[in-house]
Amino acid sequence: MKTMKQSVGEEMLSICTMCLLLVCLTMILLPAHGDAQNIDTSRNRVITDLKVPFALIGSIKPRSTNEIQSSNWILGCETLDRDMTDYEQYKAYIAPLGIKRLRMQAGWAKTEKTKGVYDWAWLDNIINDAAKQGFQPWLETGYGNPLYEGGGGITLSGGIPTSAVALKAWDKWVDALVKRYKDKVKDWEIWNEPNFGDNEINRPELVAALNIRTAEIIKKNQPAATISGLAMGHISLDYADAFFRVIHQKKKMNLFDNMTYHDYVYNPDANYGHVGDLRRVLDKYAPQVKLRQGENGSPSFGGPNRGAIGDYDWTELSQAKWNIRRMLGDLGHDIESSILGIIDMNYPKTGPITRMNVKGIIESDSTKRAIRPKMAYYAMQNVAAIFDHSLQRLKDLHPTFNADPRVDTLEHRYAKNTDRSISVYGYEKISTKMQLYSIWNDEYIPTNSNTTRNITLTFLNANFSEPVYVDLITGAVFEIPSGNWTRKGNKYTFKDMPIYDSPILIADKSLIPTR
């Protein structure tokens, strides 16, 4: 007969054994440190209820960054300077995504914690690994440093450095930063969203002066550097005009290749009129300087403390639609496009609440662990596999479409006062002249419905050998039956194409890497 002591001992042993088994099981199920083992590479990795009445012939084959020479895309890897994400957790997910350029912040305060002493170890690890993998960091100088009186803020909306002592220390840090990484970093940006900062400190005239002094230090050390200025949060035309005017008056526009903006809107197609207004303001001072969309993205679910446009009922599906509409809308306007961000960002706690900015295309948690790719990861991977710089945009594009049963003439629209507006952009392979067209309903915020409407489209001066229909959310590639398309000379008509609020392609099969 067992004693009570023996029974308790055996029970404790059993509990310990169960705990050990649970720990082992957890270690098996959870992804290893940044090994990207949770990337689904199967053909049916994303399944939706989209109905396409054509024969499925394959799916888009992803391309790694080493298979792509260059493209329009930039991947947001922000907030590493404030420890809101962990590069080690997500670095293995970047190459399979197929995007080469990475937007990062250098972190003055994280690097200089003792006056005059720079600890580069954290940034060395990131920049060296990125360069080793063939990535191209786009590195932003900022934020400020509280070590110095008047040294500026260290977070979003912080003021810029203003005191003579702080600005001298800033100059010294930027100089050391560029010298250290100039062999691995060619693309730079100055500060982040200054127009969200202190209205008195971050006046456009002072921010312009900081941009000039910083750009001059970069160019002194790296004459061939690409430099982006402004990095404006949302679009304030008055702020931009005052900023540009100062740089123009000081004859320093030659320092800058790009002026960047971050314009978060619920409908990603609704702001191109505003972007056009910004372009016209910049044209007054520097028509040769490009606009670059430097930061944009959508949450994967809504709620309080979710950052820009977070107060909407987002899902992973609507996030995926938003991101690829932004990517292809920007491409259709010849604007380089950066998507925020690679992983959910773990913001500092507000009281007992952990704030997560869930714009990541990889799910994370309060430990910054990379859990799994979201639907947007695979959708962006599909876009990156097809749209690289081997394609050129068709600028004189005037397709027609017939639906419901209206006839309309399409142009590259910013917006149109109609409940049946669609976006259509055309591209051709430089080497073969084969073509593809991206098409989607653009009149509303991306929804959770995949209901389509049939549209007949006609393209002049087109060139197809074997046209296919491609859904970029799922990556599914469908044969377009012979009864659904006709050709008369260089005029192609595609009948009853299912169109919805996410981009689909009508493309020559040769332009779609298929598996």
Image: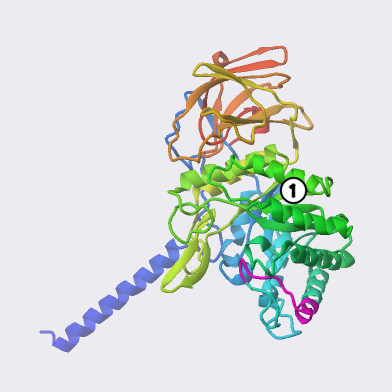
For the point 63% across and 70% down, the residue is 158
Residue pointed to by mark 1:
291
Say whether residue 438 is magenta. no
Residue 466's place in the image compared with 65, above or below, is: above
* Visible residue check, residue 69: no
On the picture, is 390 further left or further right than 349? right
Q: At label 1, which amino acid type do we have?
A: Leu
On the picture, is 448 further left or further right than 508? left
On the picture, is 139 further left or further right than 218? left
x, y percent for residue 317: 47, 44
Residue 313 or residue 473, whichever sits in front: 313
> On the rendered image, what quadrant is the N terminus found in?
bottom left
x, y percent for residue 76: 63, 57
Kindly give the residue lying farthest to the top in the view shown. Answer: 488
x, y percent for residue 162: 74, 75
* Visible residue check, residue 431: yes
On the picture, is 420 further left or further right than 87? left
Residue 214 or residue 4, whichever sits in front: 214
Q: Which residues are magenta?
A: 155-169
Say whether residue 156 is magenta. yes
For the point 73% across and 19% down, the residue is 461
Q: Which SS does the magenta portion mostly show?
A: loop
